[in-house]
Image: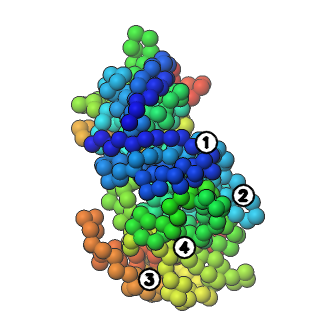
Amino acid sequence: MVAPAFEYVAAGGYDEAVRLLADGGDEAKILAGGQSLMPMLNLRLAHPELLIDINAADDRQPSVADGMLVLPALTRHRVLLEHDLVRRHCPLLAAAVRHVGNVRVRNRGTVGGSLAHADPTSEIGSCALATGARVIARGPGGDRTLPASELFIGYWTTALAESEIITDVLIPVGRPRQGWSFQEMVRRTSDFAIVAVAALVELDEEADTIAAARVALAGVADRVMLAGPDLLTGLTGATLAGGTGAGSTGPGSTGAGSTGAGGSGDDAAGAAAALIAGGLDPVDDVHASGEYRRRLVRVLTARALREAYARATGAVA
Amino acid sequence: MNRRRLVLSVNGGDHEVWVLPSDTLLDVLHDELGLADVRYGCGEGVCGTCTVLLDGEPVNGCLILAVQAAGRPVTTLRGLMGPGETLHPLQECFLRRGASQCGFCTPGMVLTALDLVRRRGRASREEIRYALVGNLCRCTGYTKILDAVEEYADQAADTPDGVPS
């Protein structure tokens, strides 16, 4: 199909873009990488009258300041995948972006655009939640900072005001006693996730026991979401086995100790995964039933926690 | 909606075109400039038949507006060919390996694979599969395409500048 007619203006900076967006109201949309908006236009799922192109608004590169990895909103997925600072300080995100689109989508798609699009299966969105990221949004009244956990409010809907634009994504830099894992199930590489799980595990200063864990889920609700902290309390003080060998926790790998054969065994990871899955009610759609998605959450969450734990202990790179 | 005048720099030549703001780069390359090697497949960025290089990087021609490409170098498959339309070495590999049948996907395959080899040199078969995951072929079953790209990547690794001319 062919996109509906619209007007186009390129903004030279975020302030100009905000002004144009405020003037354009409902009928104006921001064009960043365009890898979600342009398909929606081509399929006539969106009918804006004005596109405000922000691609020339900012040419900053990723940087690190005050313990934060600072990703300018226009950072392309390819940069997330390859940039030294991202790989060093947020390897979770660099790994997750491998699952996003294809090489052409990653050349254009942006981190800010992806978060603002708020797809409920978003790899980047789930990483933002798992890492405790914040976004800086600019509006007519200036900048404000918003935790990722307050950004997503429903299908393709964020808490951004009508004339606000994400300018930066701030991700706390990874720490030494911290491990991560990203697990995703798709039928074909590069498809939208049926279920994806991003996990971050932090160990106690002295012992190899879990001090804190965060689990974010994609593909299970109307938004990417964090598992409730109350569902993860059983992990505190636990040690996990079976996470050895990155990505090898599928059926057939036994791991050590009491974890059983892959999937969700009866260790603290399996118990937390079962609790998380039990509290979800994913919808059925053409890709998968809600029941299958719930099962994937249980299996992938247990795998993610074990792999994240193994990384935190240094057993897995 | 008013048309606006742009200069598109395609395959080394400048072209003045009048476009609507909503015209995609694919629309203009194919319909206005008559470049039949840039093709409409899905309109969603998943099939790869409209692949072009913009500033040297593969992009979906269907997901970028013509106005966004103004003044930036655009390369289509045709732009890879030498004087007198001699084939690019990667095209030769495609021919030799029987990697084209109907040929509809071939321009996108070639441009995407070329980008991979330019970046990675002798890419592994797994890397080639991963790079081409967004290029759909309904004829070949992909094996011969992977063979062709692998052959080219091996050649590239054996030449001093990394890319066979």
Instruction: Name the residue type under label 2.
Output: Val
Label 4 secondary element: helix
Residue B9 visible at all: yes
Q: Label 3 vs label 4: CA separation?
A: 17 Å
Q: Which residue is mark 4?
A: A149
Q: Of the numbered discs in the image, which one, if any, rests on residue A276?
A: 3
**Which of these two is toward me, A212 or B96?**
A212
Query: Which type of secondary structure does the marked residue at label 1 adopt?
Result: loop
Q: Amino acid at mark 1?
A: Gly
Q: Residue B128 falls in which quadrant of the image?
A: top left
Chain that bears disc 4: A
Residue found at x 68% / y 82%: A204
Q: Residue furthest front?
A: A23
Front residue of A305 and A128: A128
Mark positioned earlier in the residue sequence (2 or 1): 1
Report in which chain the residue with disc 2 lies: A
Q: Share a chain, discs 4 and 2?
A: yes
Mark 3 and mark 4 on one chain: yes
Residue mark closest to the camera, 4 vs 1: 1
The residue wearing badge 1 is A12
Residue to which mark 2 is pinned:
A64
> Tag 2's secondary structure?
strand
Query: Label 3, label 2: how many angstroms apart (C-alpha)?
Result: 33 Å
Q: Mark 3 and mark 1: span between their CA atoms?
A: 45 Å
- Density class for disc 3 (Cα within 10 Å; few <14, some 14-19, many ≥20) is many
Q: Residue at x 23, y 31 (%)?
A: B102
Front: mark 3 or 4: 4
